[in-house]
Image (cartoon, rainbow, N blue to C red):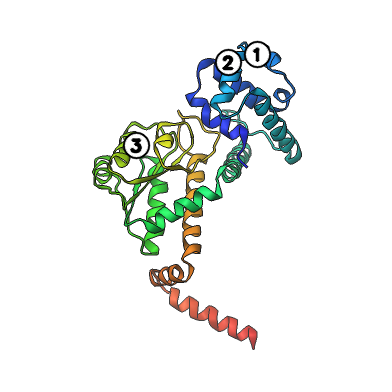
Amino acid sequence: MKSLLAYLQSYYRQATEAEKEIITYWLQNPEKSSRLNIRELANETYTSTSSIIRLCQKLDFAGYKELRSALIYEAAIREKENHRQIEDLNKEDSLEHIIEKVTLRNITSLKSTAQNLDPKMIRECLHLMQQARAICLFGLGSSLLAARDLYLKMLRINKLCLIHDEWHVQLLMAKNLGPEDLAILFSYSGMTHEMIQCARIIKESGGKLISVCGFEKSTIAKTADYNLAVVTNEHIFRSGAMSSRIAQLNVVDILFNAFINQNYECSIKQVSKTHILKDNEQELVQDLNKMTLGRRE
């Protein structure tokens, strides 16, 4: 089941100023919010009941009553699991605090992303990957790292993949895509200008598009046939990708392992075939085999 609070976070960047006030209040006070009626919430957020109703409908709820029920459920889950609040790093943090905060942020991002992923959608994405003549991968910055990781993994099982670091080459790849091809585009914000151009050209060219974005209402996510949403606590304007990068890599691992699972025998043979032995690795394997046989005897 998708986390409502994660959904609110993903919508926040596209919200109006009044909507941001309401969403911020929900995110900061989920337990208290679940006990407020619509007039009380309007007073607390200095907005109007009509603004709240419109926001609920934009979020695909019938009205405030339905969203409030979802908040009550989420508040109960949070209380049961006793989630620790993840604070932002600050100047006074000790090394121990930095280790704890960064680790907790990454763990929370992985858990939230897992909650948000729809198995049915992943199965449909795997079908597209299986049927595609070629898989073209797109991304810039840290998102390109996730794309390149998927490229190397698919190369191990001999699935034709294309990738390039240069954006202009990515643009040409997008123009050359056809109905038999699949594009997988990585963009945390879903609003990077260059990637928006690629996404639109991919669809105009007739190719299928899977996006891996952090914001489900972003331009790229809405352009894609399927969006595998990553959930993090990072802001768009961040010093460097941290939990978003790890969440994207986790999605890559899920896709790759699920793809292998669907084609298990063939994929395992290919992984063995493409394994590159390191120096002295063969000798180490033989020594380990001898040790294992010796223990059995």
Instruction: Name the mark on residue 51.
Output: 2
Foreground mark, 1 or 2?
2
Decide if residue 294 is on the left or right side of residue 192: right
Residue at 35% across, 55% down: 132
Quarter of the figure with residue 166: top left
Q: CA distance from mark 2 to mark 3?
A: 32 Å
Viewer-proximal residue, 244 or 36?
36
* Disc 3 packing (10 Å; few <14; some 14–19; many ≥20): many
Q: Is residue 253 above or below residue 46?
A: below
Quarter that holds the C terminus: bottom right
Residue at 30% across, 49% down: 179
Quarter that holds the N terminus: top right
Question: Considering only order in the chain, which callout, 3 or 2, is on the residue closer to the N terminus?
Answer: 2
Question: Considering only order in the chain, which callout, 2 or 1, is on the residue closer to the N terminus?
Answer: 1
Decide if residue 35 is on the left or right side of residue 146: right
According to the image, label 1 marks what residue? 42
Question: Considering only order in the chain, which callout, 1 or 3, is on the residue closer to the N terminus?
Answer: 1
Q: CA distance from mark 3 to mark 1?
A: 38 Å
* Disc 2 packing (10 Å; few <14; some 14–19; many ≥20): few
According to the image, label 3 marks what residue? 195
Q: x, y (%) of residue 11?
A: 52, 29
